Amino acid sequence: MRLRLLLLPSLRSKLHPPPRHCCSSSPITNGVASRRRFSTEGSAPRPVIGPDSVEVLGYSYPRDDFTNVTPKILEKVGRNLHNQSHHPLWLIKERIKAHFYSSYMGRWGNPLFSVHDNLSPVVTVEQNFDSLLIPPTHPSRKKGDNYYLNRATMLRAHTSAHQSDLVRSGLDAFLLAGDVYRRDEIDASHYPVFHQMEGVRLFSNHELFSQVKDGHQLSLFESGGRRTPQKQETHTLEAVKLVEFNLKQTLTRLITNLFGDLEVRWVDCYFPFTHPSFEMEVRFHGDWLEVLGCGVMEQELLNSAGAGNKLGWAFGLGLERLAMVLYSIPDIRLFWSQDERFLKQFRVQDIHQPICFQPLSKYPPLHNDISFWLPDDGFTENDFYELVRSVGGDLVEKVSLVDDFTHPKTGRRSHCYRIVYRHMERTLTQQEVAVVHGQIQQDAESELGVQGRY
Ligand code: PHE
């Protein structure tokens, strides 16, 4: 099963995700956005997505052929579940902060890691991809996988989008939490908006080697070296091994602090912005669950962010994934619930208090199928998932392709999808589902050029 809550979705199945950075809740001001006028008196509020522009968090972005955000997605921007007191995602974030604050102290007893949880999710494509050395043709940049406001601006696909800016601002150790956005399939563990926590730590020569006997004779860098599976060309093997050890030890301690003793394993993987790169998996109910991606930061990234004399590690973990495991939350849509029966269970006095989550009763599902001929000029499954989400919202629990048929004579291709509808808080009627389902059929024909097969 692909768990993507965290972070890893597009990364792993497509060659690694796009990074993005951004840095503050201020807007992007390179001529791309302008401040919106909040003058709604006497008239209905302006639609968020207008014919020429898209408005997000009070700024207006001109539309172009890349614009693909939907009103349903924009509704989520600004919800900041990770900053909502006693929300389960907030609780996990606070526990991670508390762990880092108490375990890592600076020379004056100050916390070593600074924490940032208020950076705008609107970032430039440069931040999300280029600053992370993601090549211009990399598949993770696809329109079908991301939410673009226009060609230059997008909703961040991962918190790595901010790495470069925060390093450039002079930080050597930081944590950063935020909402991230990816177009994807729909099921109990996939939702187009989820939350990540990023961590970065840089080391100078002195910091890395001062604890090692005769460490002053060692260096971080070498010239004429080669890139191998273990290290980058400019790094010495001894420096990389110490950084890698520190990274893995930091993360193992964090996970042990959150979950108690549990089995952990490291799997080699690839990200364009780290080398070597790893994923951590934890054993949960007998299965290995991937919970984070990490690695030794690419030196080119640090060089261009003004920290060329240091080596660093970075990690990104998925907060929903951790919360689902820690509290046995069965469905990712529950994080968006405003139902008191869900929220009140997390209102503990002390963030370390164990929580025994009682699932809300499951209301019965209803499924309806939809079949159509695909247009000759191309069809992207994610576009259909997006359309289903736009019309059905959180009523849709899962969409799966149940039949892919090619007509033997005409060569025409058709898909049949099964859509499972379920409300988290009440029983749905067949009539109300029929309205939504009919609308999906109609919109698929008019927007995706498919032809219904009934
Ligand atoms: N940004 C990656 C993701 O979204 C995770 C990651 C972060 C990997 C930092 C390496 C370093 O999956």
Image (tube, grey):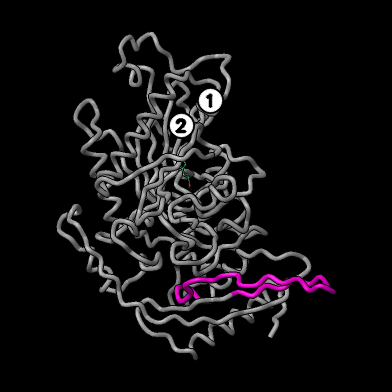
Q: Give the numbered dot on residue 433.
A: none
Instruction: Work out whether residue 25 can be spotted.
Output: no
196 versus 328 height, above or below: above
As measured in the structure, the alpha-carbon distance from the residue carrying label 1 to the one carrying label 2 is 9 Å
Q: From which residue to which does the magenta span run?
A: 392-417
Which residue is painted at 63% across and 78% down in the image? Answer: 443
Q: Determine whether the residue tagged by mark 2 lies in a helix, strand or loop.
A: strand
Return the residue found at the far bottom: 431
Nearer to the camera, 439 or 165: 439
Residue 131 rendering spot, x and y as whole percentages: 54, 38
Q: Earlier in the sequence, mark 1 or mark 2?
A: 1
Which residue is painted at 27% across and 43% down in the image? Answer: 256
Nearer to the camera, 361 or 193: 361
Q: Overall secondary structure of the magenta stretch?
A: strand
Return the residue found at the far front: 286
Nearer to the camera, 29 or 330: 330
Q: Amino acid at mark 2?
A: Val
- Mark 1 neighbour class, 10 Å CA radius: few under 14, some 14 to 19, many 20 or more: many
Q: Amino acid at mark 1?
A: Gln
234 versus 283 height, above or below: above
Q: Give the numbered dot on residue 296.
A: 2
Q: Give the numbered dot on residue 232.
A: 1
- Mark 2 neighbour class, 10 Å CA radius: few under 14, some 14 to 19, many 20 or more: many
Residue 59 rendering spot, x and y as whole percentages: 49, 58
Q: Are marks 1 and 2 in contact (CB under 8 Å)?
A: yes
Instruction: Indicate the quadrant containing the C terminus: top left, top right, bottom left or bottom right.
Output: bottom right
